[in-house]
Amino acid sequence: MERNRDAILSDSSRSLHTPVDENKPKYQPPKQDYAAIVKAGRASSADLSQVADRKERARSATRKATRRAGWVPSSESVSIGGREIGGMIYVGTPPRLNDYGYRDKCRAYIDPSLSVAREGTDKVGNYMPYWPGYSEIPSQCRATYLDWLAGGRSDPSYDPGYMFLYFYGLERRFVLDQPLDAEKREILQEVRRLKSLYPDNGSVQRYLGEFIQLAQLSLVNDDSDLEPVFDYRGWELPLLLKVAIGSRAGRGELLSADWALSWLLCHPERRLRTPATRCVEEFHALFRLRFEERFPGGLKVNKPRKVLKSTYQSASSEFQAQIEPTLDGAKVPDISGLRKPVEIAQEIADEVMDDLDKLSRYLGRNPDGRGSVEAQALLPQELWELFPSEELERLKAWAAERVGSGGLIPVLDVVERLEGTRPEKLSKRILTGAADALARIGYGFAPDPRFALRSPKLDEPVVLFELGESVGQLENVSDDYRAALIEAALGSFVAHADGQITESERKSLLAKATDVDGFSGQEYRRLAANVEWMLAVAPDVALLRRKLKDTGPEAMASIRSALVAAAHADGVIQSEEVAGIEKIYKALGLDPALVYSDLHAGDVSDGPVRVRAAEPGAAGETIPDETPSGLPKLDAARIAAIQSDTARVSSVLGDIFDDTPEVPEDAEPNETVLGGLDAKHSHLVKALIAQDHWTEEAFEELCRATGLLASGAIEDINEWAYDSYDEALLDEYDGYDVSPDLAAQLKKKFEEEMPHVEA
């Protein structure tokens, strides 16, 4: 110190005794216009005074807000950690929550005495505990929280833990401090806003949702202010719903469709399938219509004896609130244990989901297809007025015009009119979707996507026709219709055998199609349209031969019997019939020479024919004269045999072309069966997910080994995958690509099921 002081003094001394240069000019200060300076100062003094006043008021307000402790209302602000924070928060020394052992501090209080980092660096919440408290979190988290508060409290990129820390104060103020209703409404509005920031976070939706229920209940005057809840995540029925339905049951009021639907959707044991979530608006609308049709005045709910009591557990875990609501001075019955109303609502919902299934499947394949012609056509007819579509009306006019022009139209034109694009490949799914869409507006097309021996090719036409009415379930046809369709297919093979269709052949086939007892008017129209298509489009003999390649002796004998029965049906066998049957025998790989023996015998034996050696008759016997016969007599037994043969061949062919899967012979006895698939398709799925890509040849070989047709297997598996996982398992591109994400899930499922299967 002494040395430093001496050095300073020494330097000062030298500077004071430095000799002055007498010849150097002296410094002269510049001349100032003092009058101008005074004038300018007077002009700006008012502005400067206003600025000074504003700054002083701001400093005073900040000092005043900073000094206050406890709840800071929304109209005030505080300065904490160098940040200006708006109100609706607790500030000050946090109160103790208990006096035993480790004394917890109130989590919501912002203690200004605690350190705060210069910058908030933990937006993702790496250092935030499950139940955060401002006094316990590290300084960088405090800084991050204060940044979120100062930045508007609206940034969802911050970890939800910071939002919860803010929410802890809001629920504490509302429940424990019991402010005026005006402030309660302000807090309720703020919590609703916070809930919307994190729509996909289960904890946010649950805890903030329960608070909103409590807050609404405390602010309503009667149950008419309560509205149904259709989107709720929780483990039990929401409090507001219990109050609303319980109070109505207490007064003996009938339950409306909206409250019944709300009860079902909020019930923890509800069973909802994809249509209810993928087609939400349509599901709600159709449920209301079906409910009101079944209960025009509303549903009677028996009054429970139990009184509603509930406990609100704060999200901060710091307090509880006991709730025993009353409306109009009466206690509210507790409907939590009632089962019958929920079961009735579930029955209606199941019916509605079934009716929306086709629309849901279409939207699953075409997420942007809502509002398209096909999607609109797949709506149940009751919803057409509620969801009107000009495109649908134009589709009706287009279909009527094409039917009036004869009905024949390229299949790609039909698909393009419905879906807006011309596909490079036609699948059964595309054709079925088109048929379903047209059926909803009262039109159909042939060939039947579900029952035809083959589907139309890209360059072939289909036949549009009127169904006579709107049809929701095309697959609902009689067994007689299926049998008649197969017989018509065989007849078309005979007609096409000589390369041309004669008018007599056309009339004969159409006559048979309309001469079947027990058909509905719609089935007559469908069968006639399919015959028209079979006559207009040459049959694919190779396809028939390929499908019948492995047919057993019994099935082949049934086919022969049906052809013979058809030839004998009118009592006269024409040469053209013989020639036609010869050609179809040849197409089926049979020896054409069998036609004559079959026709002569009038029947085809399922077993070997026993041949007896000829024996000479008695000598001298005369041959009696032929007795003149009158009109031919009908043999009832013979007619019954013909009908039996026809029914048998229809059954056999139906089995041949039936897509109903069977259990593969090489499948393990205890092999895992996936929900929604049978053992045969489950076996195929397990084989498919073993690799990422399959060539067409390898895929077809795998299907043959499993006992399935490749085209049908693709559709069945992808439809199942859409319903179960909302994506297709197989994608057709230079073969078949297997979805890696879905394959990983299925592999895990197979692995999880194995121990249970083996046990």
Image: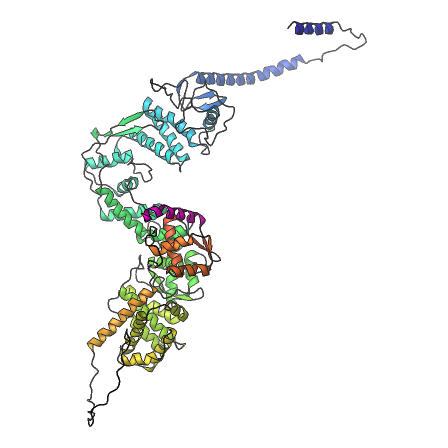
Instruction: Farthest residue to the right: give it.
Output: 23
Q: Where is residue 210, by image quadrant?
A: top left
Main secondary-structure element of the magenta-colored stretch:
helix
On the image, the x and y values in percent for residue 403 come to 37, 65
Residue 509, percent from left and from top = 32, 73
The percent coordinates of residue 16 (x first, y second) are 73, 5
* Residue 282 seen anywhere in this rendered image of the structure: no
Q: In this view of the protein, which residue sits in the foreground, 1 or 569?
A: 1
Q: Is residue 605 left or right of residue 687?
A: left
- Please state the extent of the stretch shown in magenta in the rendering: 738-758
Residue at position x 23%, y 74% from top? 641
Q: Position of residue 272 (x, y in %)?
A: 31, 45
- Tell me the quarter of the picture where residue 156 sits: top left
Depth order, front residue of 112/389: 112
Image quarter in which the N terminus is found: top right
The reply, left or right, for residue 583 in relation to residue 565 is right
Look at the picture and state if 178 lies above or below 456: above
Q: Residue at the spot x=33%, y=39% of the render?
A: 231
Looking at the image, which is closer to me, 94 or 506?
Answer: 94
Numbered label tally: 0
- Residue farthest along the bottom direction in this orientation: 620
| Visible residue check, residue 448 | yes
Judge from the rendering whether residue 420 lies leftward or rightward of residue 557; answer left or right: right
Q: Is residue 623 magenta?
A: no
Up-down relation of residue 402 to residue 92 (above or below): below
Coloring scheme of the render? Answer: rainbow
Q: Judge whether residue 746 is colored magenta.
A: yes
Residue situated in front as seen by the camera: 482 or 434: 482
